[in-house]
Amino acid sequence: MLKPLNENQEAFHTIRLLEDRDALEIIDQTLLPGETRYIVLENIEDIWEAIYQLRVRGAPAIGIAAAYGVYLASRWSHASTYFQLYDVFMKNKEYLASSRPTAVNLFWALNRMEDCLKRHQETTVEKALLELKLEATKIQLEDEEVCRSIGEHALTLLKPGWGILTHCNAGALATSRFGTALSPLYLGQQQGYDFNVYADETRPLLQGARLTTWELQQAGVNVTLICDNMASIVMQEGKVQAVITGCDRVAANGDAANKIGTSGVAILAKHYNIPFYICAPLSTIDFDCPTGGDIEIEQRPSEEVVSKWYEKPMAPENIKVYNPAFDVTDQSLITAIITEKGVLKSPYSEALKEVKKQIGK
Ligand code: MRU
């Protein structure tokens, strides 16, 4: 059982339902690491904005925030009949679904909430609202268990003293707790594995530099920040024995979309003969999406590249910018996909079909 590592690891929470206020509290990840500030979201536009602006981010955390979002929007509506409630719910579901397109957890969580509401057609509005609240809470609590389990499976692939490279942030900040790709690093820390973690800065939004280092440093994990273009040299110098990242959507053939830059890291890992692992909760697997080519890649505004993190714009005014937020790693580059059910190996189409059967999808 993965316990808190120390007091610091418990010193932050990503998302919390404030039951007494009917509101959602999140840690504003855009302000980290400089400022640890919690913000309270009290209307659906603020929840949409928080997801879009990456105040709350990471595939599982986006799903959890959206699940609470549709519950709260339904409660705020003061609907007096089930049909009014369903109508409001669906409008808000559609609205939140428009916030970010790539992480399938968003749609998975929203669909799960809709299924819950449909199961309670015959009840009162109050009871249906209670069931929605319970479902959202369940999604959050289950995610914690899922992450713990991913950590345990992933740790079986790693050895004490290894150098581990990670990209973006797939830690506690991206989930309800522990993270996916960072979960084995926390678990290894408890068990004296003494990993040397290399965190890619992850341009342009710097999730690695701002968030992964912040989380791991607080937990006492030995972490070193590198710029994205330094991944090759640390691999060449023999400092990395495994790469481990999270992901936003796994297609039915095993192709995996994750933060922009991940596929480049996977190509480098192949070149240097280093295993490349993807951690994916089952909620991140899109069995209806045949290949990575079918995954919608989010395009983000140019200011994130040229001005967001700089005192002055770092490129000429009106420069054309291409800013895809994710890329797809070809399944042939992935050594294993680690889920809460265990470690999947190629051929992924077959392995994923088997998982689908097991979970009765
Ligand atoms: O744009 P972001 O910061 O939401 O992207 C996050 C990632 O790409 C993570 O690696 C992924 O969501 C997995 S989080 C467990």
Image (spheres, helix red, strand yellow):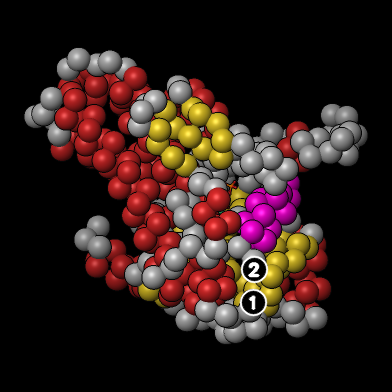
Mark 1 Cα shell of 10 Å, populated few (<14), some (14-19), many (≥20): many
- Residue behind mark 2: 221
Question: Circle 2 sits in a helix, a strand or a loop, which is it?
Answer: loop
Magenta highlight on residue 191: no
Q: Which dot marks residue 254?
A: none
* Quarter location, residue 228: bottom right
Q: Name the spot of residue 205 as percent of width and height, x first.
A: 70, 45
| Residue 209 highlighted magenta (yes or no) | yes
| Whether residue 253 is situated above or below residue 143 in the rendered picture | below
Q: Is residue 98 left or right of residue 259?
A: left
Instruction: Say which amino acid is labelled 1.
Output: Phe
Relative height, residue 235 to residue 118 (above, below): below
Question: Residue 277 appears in which quarter of the rendering?
Answer: bottom right
The residue at the far left in this view is 122
* Residue occupying image coordinates x 74% and y 79%: 239
Magenta span: 203-218
Q: Is residue 37 above or below residue 42?
A: below
Tell me where residue 16 sits by quadrant: top left
Question: Residue 188 at x, y = what percent?
Answer: 54, 75
- Magenta stretch, main secondary structure, is helix
Q: Quadrant of the N terminus?
A: bottom left
- The answer to whether residue 204 is seen in the rendering is yes
Q: Residue at x 24, y 16 (%)?
A: 79
Residue, x 70% and y 50% (percent of image)? 210
Q: Position of residue 341 (x, y in %)?
A: 34, 70
* Residue 309, horizontal then vertical, whole percent: 79, 40
Helix, strand or loop for disc 1: loop
**Considering depth in this image, is 209 or 37 the residue closer to the camera?**
37
Three-letter residue code for mark 2: Val
Nearest the eye: 92 or 327: 92
Instruction: Name the residue tied to disc 1.
Output: 195
Quadrant for the C terminus, please: bottom left
